[in-house]
Image (spheres, rainbow, N blue to C red):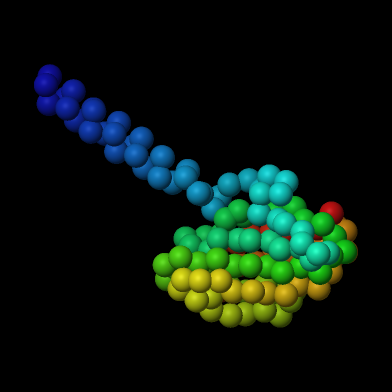
Amino acid sequence: MKQTIIATIIAVALIGGTLFLTNRNSPNGGPAPAGGNVTVVDGRQVITIDAKGGYAPRETVAQAGLPTTLLMKTRGTFDCSSALVIPSLGYRSNLPPSGEAVIEVPPQAAGTTLEGLCAMGMYNFSIRFE
């Protein structure tokens, strides 16, 4: 009986800890809240995306018709999310393991969706321009 209770407590602690860690800063989150990872400064919009174990946020809504800078941030990123491909821009590059990569995006028409993915196709993100 005592062993069963101890085993149950350990199992609950492990499952709870795993759920807490995987939901924290999860790249599988929904669309970024308005203004969450998008800022507009002097008529230029900056979209920040974190790359490590995937991309966060996975979905972003941005303003159409503005010149855009995509700021890819890494911190100890050694997985395939560091090998970024953005097909519609003809972009293919390895991000630095830690730091920032700046990608210039020309103004996009309303209704356009920009897709980015790792070189293996395991992780992706999208930016919808409205």
Q: Nearer the viewer, residue 45 or 112?
A: 45
Q: Residue at x 44, y 46 (%)?
A: 22
The residue sitting at 82% across, 57% down in the picture is 63
Residue 3 visible in the shown view: yes
Give coordinates of residue 53: x percent, y percent: 47, 60
Residue shown at 53% from the left, 79% from the top: 94
Vertical position of residue 70 compared to residue 1: above or below: below
With 21 as the anchor, is 126 left or right in this view?
right
Left or right of 104 on screen, residue 25? left
Where does residue 75 sit, x and y in percent of width and height? 46, 65
Give how far across and how far down residue 98 sits, in percent: 46, 71
Residue lying farthest to the top in this orientation: 1
Q: Position of residue 109 (x, y in %)?
A: 88, 64
Quarter of the picture holding the C terminus: bottom right
Left/right placement of residue 127 relative to residue 15 reads right
Residue at 50% x, 67% y is 74
